Amino acid sequence: KELVMNLLVLRFANIAFGSLWNRHAIKAVQVIFKETRGVEGRGGYFDQYGIIRDVMQNHLLQMMALVAMEQPLSLSAEHIRKEKLKVLQSVAPLELDDLVIGQYTSSPHGCGYVDEASVQNKASTTETFAAAVLHVDNPRWAGVPFVLKAGHGITENKVELRVQFHRVPGVVRELRQCEANELVVRVQPEEAIYWKVQNKVPGLKSNEVEQMRMDLLYSRLAKRHSRQMPKAYERLLLEVLANDHSHFVSAEELDASWRIFTPALHQLQERGVQPEPYPFGSRGPAAADDLARKYGMRKFGGGLTPYISPFNLNPEAMSRSSKEYKEQGEEGEAGPA
């Protein structure tokens, strides 16, 4: 994808991000894949694998690697692969305590997974939703949760990367309610890169602040240059013809990726873990919000949600029902998408 390929330029060609790209400034990184549709005609294939193998272990993990890797010696395929491999080898194997799986059920918005005509096993426990928290064991990222979230039958279609920063330490009293900064790279449906910052509201009040977007207007930039955004497979086919394997996964990367997910996948099967049901067209299982609160977030995904310190969680906030969080919706952002 065009926006995924821009991650390296965004990171290594802008000095502002160089000093911020570490655990001291970044609170969490989220890579999110959401689709409103179910598996539809893909049930025969999907039921053998599930969304962890289908999307998370490859596509989302590759995006995470581009965020977490060190600067390569060059942008050649060999150098990029070496750095991605190093960071994947630094990721601890996924623990079941850091994983939530779900399966969509029938609702007014659509049929359940086992009701799909292409799903032959009507007692299937294949997951259609997964939220996982990974940990990179190196000096740059120690303590920073990397969230991978993927789901079918969700509220909206979206693929995006969200880099969420810490709040300003020791901020003056009047600005303590300000939200934390966030860098968002939206891969689809509308390509966008924007930086969420605090801004004074025009007027006589000196302490009236709201969060605004500094938008790169990426899709408009392409139109200005009279260029169309290349499709993902269009780019790959061109690279095959040019004998360029920069964006292809090496065998070593593949081994490192499976090392992260295979133990958890085996445990799910051996223990007979049942996916949590969630209505088709909803945000996903409520347990995903519980996992988010474990790491000091109200929920996974976007929205202008208050910061919750993971070291000072309010017992009252922890005891709120999942229904309350569901009613807040997945997105609460102000301004145009």
Image (cartoon, rainbow, N blue to C red):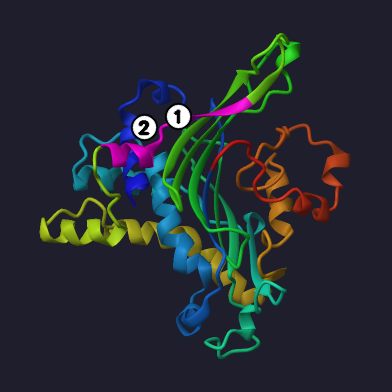
Q: Which mark is residue 11?
A: 2
- Which of 262 and 113 lies nearest the eye of the viewer? 113
**Are discs 2 and 1 less than 8 Å apart at CB?**
yes
- Which of 13 and 251 lies nearest the eye of the viewer? 13
Residue drawn where x is 61% and y is 71% of the image: 268
- Which residue was labeled with disc 1? 21
Q: Is residue 298 shown left or right of residue 337?
A: right
Residue 244 visible somewhere in the drawing: yes
Residue 124, image quadrant: bottom right
**130 versus 107 height, above or below:** above
The location of residue 248, given as percent across then percent down, is: 26, 57
Amino acid found under the numbered disc labelled 1: Trp
The location of residue 174, given as percent across then percent down, is: 75, 13
Region in magenta? 211-224
Residue 7 visible somewhere in the drawing: no
Q: Crowding near pointer 2: few (<14 within 10 Å), some, many (20+)? A: some
The location of residue 219, given as percent across then percent down, is: 37, 42
Query: Which type of secondary structure does the marked residue at label 1 adopt?
Result: loop
- Which of 10 and 130 lies nearest the eye of the viewer? 10
Mark 2 or mark 1, whichever is nearer to me = 2
